[in-house]
Image (cartoon, grey):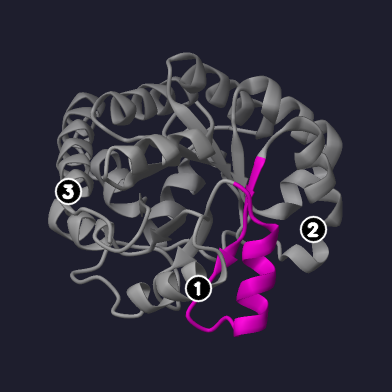
Amino acid sequence: MSISATFGKAKAEGRSVLVGCMPAGFPTVDDSIASMVAMAEAGCDVIEVELPYSDPVMDGPVIQKASDIALANGVRTRDTLRIIEAVAGAGATVVLMTYWNPIERYGVDAFARDLAAAGATGMITPDLIPDEAGEWIAAADRYGIDRTFLVSPSSTDDRLAMTVGHCRGFVYATALMGVTGARTSVSSQAPELVARVRAVDPEMPVGVGLGVGTGAQAAEVAAFADGVIVGSALIRCVLEAPDLATGHQRLRALSAELAEGVRSGAPS
C-alpha cells in the first residue's frame, strides 16, 4: 500500500498513522528485518527504514549509535534495498529516510529505480531542500515514489508553502528545533506548525516527529496530526536489551502501546 493510500485509509477510520523508524542493518541485516516486521505486526502502519550514514546531523544519540553499529557490521546501501524488499514483501508500507550524499554517490535515477523496485513507496530527505532537489523530484516522478521534505517551527511562511508544494505523500513536521530523541513531553510548537501546514494545503497529511516515546504522547500528537513518527524510543528497545529476543519482545510491546495511542487520539 502506498504512503498516500495508508494515510487515506487511516483518515477514513478517523485516526492517525503510526510511523515507526528503524535503521537498516541494526544490529545485523536479518535482525533489522525481524525488528521491522515485528513493528508492523504490532501496529505500526508505516515502517521508516533509515539508511545508516556516518554523519547523521539530524539524528540524536540513540539513532546515531544504532547506525554506527550497522555501519561497523558492514551494512551498505544495497543491503538497505534488500531489507526494504523483505519488509515490503511481508506486507508493510515502507518509506526510506536517508541523507542525500549516499543517493548522489549511488546515482539519483538508478537509486529511484531500485528503491521503487524494492517496494518502497516514499523517501524522506532531511538534508535536501526542494530548491536543490530538481533531479530527485524528476526521478521520483518517473518511478512513482512519494517525496517528503521537512518543515520546522523556524520555517518562514514562504518557505513552508514552497516546501509543502513539493511534497507528495506527507509533510514531515519536526516538532522542535534540535536532533531526534524521546522526551518527557511533546513540543508545544507542534500543533501550531501543523496548523500552518494545513493553512497552506488542507489535504496534505502532516506527520510529526521528534520526541514521542509513549502511548500517551502518541495519543496527544494524534489529536492534531495525521501521522505520529517514532524512532529513538523504538530503537532503544533493541539497543538496551540484554538479548535480541528480549529486544523484540519490548519492541512489540511498545509498538502496540503506540498503536493504541494513535487510535485513541482522534485527529481534529
* Image mark for residue 133: 2
Look at the picture and state if 67 lies above or below 256.
Answer: below
Location of residue 45 by image quarter: top left
Is residue 160 something one can see in this rendering?
yes
Distance Cα–Cα, label 1 vs label 2: 24 Å
Please give the range of residues in magenta: 146-168
Q: Which residue is mark 1?
A: 199
Q: Nearer the viewer, residue 61 or 166?
A: 166
| Neighbour tally class for label 2: few under 14, some 14-19, many 20 plus, Cα within 10 Å | some
Mark 3: secondary structure: helix
Mark 2: secondary structure: loop
In x, y percent, where is residue 134?
Answer: 85, 56
Choose mark 1 or mark 2, whichever is in front: 1
Classify residue 97 as left or right of residue 205: right
Residue at image location 37% in from the left, 53% down from the top: 226
Residue at image location 15% in from the left, 35% down from the top: 253
| Neighbour tally class for label 3: few under 14, some 14-19, many 20 plus, Cα within 10 Å | many
Classify residue 215 as left or right of residue 223: left
Q: Are marks 1 and 3 in contact (CB under 8 Å)?
A: no
Q: Which residue is mark 3?
A: 261
